[in-house]
Image (cartoon, rainbow, N blue to C red):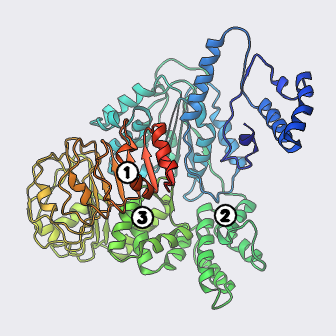
């Protein structure tokens, strides 16, 4: 308890929920005779410093909100305690930028509008221009109140996710309340709406829908107020004011304090002092400017109209490029030129700020940036890094530059994050630089039109062809027209014909195979490094394995969610494999022992026994309930850097940490 109260960092403090059992809170404030009598004895035995810590801890705990348990009614109190603890454990904070400058004034106004303690269901639309900080404010409010609700969900970037169909967005929402198995079985949007209502109508829930751009999204994800239990709160962020007029009032009986329409809060620009503080954090990596840069800083912050996104991006640009030029000339010249460039466009034009930052990137850094903007926002960085490395894009260096310039972030789950304005800016570059001959195609309709054109399209490097209900086939002549294709993502697509010596540069194939029948010939690609077959309907006798066995360069094989597959293929020819992700497979082929370059292994089945030869293995995840470390040798454990299992016995814990192991983390 003392240690918990001594933490100065609020993020690291452990939560204390005191129970005052047959005592008053006042009793532990050192005011009673028994305390006064005991203090001198403890001081003599443990010293003044230790005693002072104990006294401070007791006083602080006495001020915490807790429970007084006296006399009878213990059962009722136990239920109250358990309910509160479950709510606290249920709270899952979402990431807020580290360098964010808290705007308490706006946060407080949003909380006042929400009135989380009042009855009824409230819808709140947080709106404002792009880059003004709507999402960050929504995240802070979510973190502030999420522990007060029985069910919570924060859905990032609904506008982007909806491009793959609203059904997929419904499934993401439902996973937070019913888990992935039930959510994935939803067949259509109507069924999804009914299940959301059925699951949430008796619960007090908090749902945040980030970046809506159409009324339909709100209607299909949050419907009417009678979808949710009393005191539920539905928050959404948007630039489209029409969504604020969506009809959410229920036709059922009137509820006290139930608003008749959507409440709204318009996000205002940061105050100048806050915007300046945010700029300092990014341009100088400190809370104050360097000598001689104060006036220039104020001019730049005024010039970008105190928009948080623009302030952050231009500050990060000046920081990274300032370091690069300071050995050559006074970097104030760079600052002055940047200010002149900003003067060429409208004061509110975030795009101009982003273009200055983009033009400062090297060619391969631009390629990585554009790939993330078009395909990899909110996706794990592992596979893209492997692809970029295969393409000699110097992936780690490029990512470092993009992070420095605040064009991307990587969250704790190792996923790329990109502000929607930055993502749209990147996609707009593709549209402008490659009119009618895009280098990257992420839209389904555009991809179909491109494939149907007969001429060779040398500019196309990456193509995504995914849509619910898609039943199109791809034939050899269509891929023959894309000689420089390095990334292909398809869903519900069949390949028909002979693909010999086609797309020799293809590095990543993501294919959600629709059925077990395989109709392609010579379907192997010399440069293929990433093969993602997750959620495919393939079975043990799928003929595709025979073709892919000839792929010698494969680094990643992903079989997540292949529910009809009960055993793995023979791994003997996959000698370069570094990442292997398996579904709930009952049988893992013994040839796994030949994968001596394997670095990462994710399992949802029993751990195979022949792993000792995997010299490079550094990460292992085993999600089976009865997972055990006992099949792993001490030598193998000593090489792991991260191990994830659902349960570990005390004996296993001793083996992991007691035998000289260097495992950095064992996480559930």
Badge 2 element = loop
Front of the two marks 2 and 3: 3
Front of the two marks 1 and 2: 1
- Left or right of 426 in this view: 588: left
Front of the two marks 1 and 3: 1
* CB under 8 Å between discs 1 and 3: no
The residue singled out by tag 3 in the image is 373
- Mark 1 or mark 2, which has the lower sequence index? 2
Question: Where does the image place residue 504, in percent across and percent down from the top left?
Answer: 19, 74
The residue singled out by tag 2 in the image is 306
- Mark 1 or mark 3, which has the lower sequence index? 3
- Mark 2 or mark 3, which has the lower sequence index? 2
Tell me what residue is drawn at x 85 percent, y 29 percent.
29
The residue singled out by tag 1 in the image is 633
* CB under 8 Å between discs 1 and 2: no
- Left or right of 485 in this view: 479: left
In the image, which disc is placed on residue 237? none
Question: Where does the image place residue 396, in percent across and percent down from the top left?
Answer: 45, 71
Residue placed most toward the observer, 523 or 206? 523
Question: Where does the image place residue 547, in percent across and percent down from the top left?
Answer: 12, 61
Badge 3 element = helix
Q: CA distance from mark 1 to mark 2?
A: 58 Å
Q: Quadrant of residue 646?
A: top left
Q: Quadrant of the N terminus?
A: top right
Give the vertical position of 34 relative to 609 (above or below).
Answer: above
Tell me what residue is drawn at x 39 percent, y 35 percent.
179
Q: Pointer 2: residues within 10 angstroms few (<14), some, or many (20+)?
A: many
Q: CA distance from mark 1 to mark 3?
A: 43 Å
Give the vertical position of 360 relative to 12 (above or below).
Answer: below
Residue 423 is at least partly visible in this image? yes
Residue 214 is at least partly visible in this image? no
């Amino acid at each position: 308890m003392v240690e918990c109260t001594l933490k100065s960092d609020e993020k690291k403090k452990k939560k204390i929920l005191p129970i005052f059992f047959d005592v008053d809170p006042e009793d532990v404030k050192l005011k009673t005779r028994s305390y006064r009598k005991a203090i001198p004895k403890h001081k003599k035995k443990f010293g003044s410093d230790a005693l002072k810590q104990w006294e401070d801890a007791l006083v602080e705990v006495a001020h915490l909100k807790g429970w007084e348990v006296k006399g009878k009614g213990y059962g009722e109190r136990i239920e109250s305690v358990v309910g509160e603890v479950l709510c606290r454990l249920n709270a899952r904070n979402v990431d807020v930028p580290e360098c964010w400058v808290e705007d308490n004034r706006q946060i407080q106004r949003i909380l006042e509008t929400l009135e989380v303690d009042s009855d009824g269901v409230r819808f709140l639309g947080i709106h404002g221009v792009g880059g003004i900080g709507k999402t960050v404010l929504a995240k802070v409010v979510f973190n502030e109140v999420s522990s007060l609700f029985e069910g919570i969900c924060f859905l990032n970037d609904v506008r982007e996710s909806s491009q793959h169909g609203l059904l997929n967005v419904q499934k993401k929402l439902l996973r937070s309340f019913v888990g992935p198995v039930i959510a994935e079985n939803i067949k259509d949007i109507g069924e999804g709406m009914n299940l959301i209502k059925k699951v949430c109508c008796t619960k007090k829930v908090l749902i945040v829908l980030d970046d809506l751009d159409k009324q339909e999204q709100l209607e299909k994800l949050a419907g009417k107020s009678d979808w949710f239990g009393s005191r539920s709160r539905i928050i959404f962020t948007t630039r489209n004011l029409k969504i604020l007029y969506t009809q959410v009032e229920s036709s059922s009986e009137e509820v006290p304090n139930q608003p008749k329409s959507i409440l709204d809060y318009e996000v205002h620009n940061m105050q100048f002092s806050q915007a300046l503080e945010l700029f300092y954090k990014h341009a100088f990596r400190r809370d104050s400017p360097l000598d001689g840069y104060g006036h220039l800083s104020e001019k730049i912050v005024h010039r970008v109209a105190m928009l948080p996104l623009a302030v952050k991006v231009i500050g990060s640009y000046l920081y990274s490029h300032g370091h690069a030029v300071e050995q050559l000339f006074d970097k104030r010249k760079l600052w002055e030129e940047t200010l002149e460039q900003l003067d060429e466009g409208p004061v509110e034009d975030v795009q101009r700020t982003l273009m200055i930052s983009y033009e400062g990137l090297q060619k391969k850094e631009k390629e990585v940036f554009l790939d993330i903007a078009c395909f990899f926002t909110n996706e794990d960085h592992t596979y893209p890094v492997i692809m970029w490395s295969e393409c000699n894009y110097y992936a780690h260096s490029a990512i470092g530059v993009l992070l420095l310039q605040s064009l991307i972030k990587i969250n704790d789950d190792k996923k790329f994050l990109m502000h929607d304005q930055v993502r749209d800016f990147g996609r707009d570059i593709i549209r402008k630089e490659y009119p009618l001959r895009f280098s990257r195609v992420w839209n389904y309709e555009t991809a179909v039109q491109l494939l149907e054109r007969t001429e060779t399209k040398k500019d196309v490097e990456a193509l995504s062809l995914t849509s619910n209900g898609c039943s199109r086939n791809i034939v050899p002549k269509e891929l023959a027209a894309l000689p420089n294709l390095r990334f292909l993502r398809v869903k519900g697509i069949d390949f028909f014909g002979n693909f010999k010596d086609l797309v020799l540069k293809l590095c990543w194939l993501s294919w959600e195979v629709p059925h077990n029948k395989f109709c392609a010939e010579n379907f192997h690609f010399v440069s293929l490094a990433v093969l993602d077959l997750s959620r495919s309907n393939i079975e043990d006798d799928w003929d595709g394995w025979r073709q892919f066995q000839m792929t010698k360069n494969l680094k990643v094989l992903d079989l997540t969610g292949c529910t009809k597959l009960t055993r793995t293929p023979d791994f003997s020819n996959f000698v370069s494999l570094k990442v292997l992700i398996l579904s709930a497979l009952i049988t893992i082929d013994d040839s796994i022992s030949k994968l001596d370059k394997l670095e990462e292994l994710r399992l949802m089945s029993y751990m195979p026994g022949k792993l000792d030869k995997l010299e490079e293995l550094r990460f292992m995840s085993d999600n089976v309930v009865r997972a055990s470390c006992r099949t792993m040798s001490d030598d193998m454990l000593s090489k792991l850097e991260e191990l994830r299992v659902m349960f570990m016995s005390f004996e296993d814990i001793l083996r992991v940490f007691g035998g000289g192991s260097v495992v950095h983390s064992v996480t559930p």
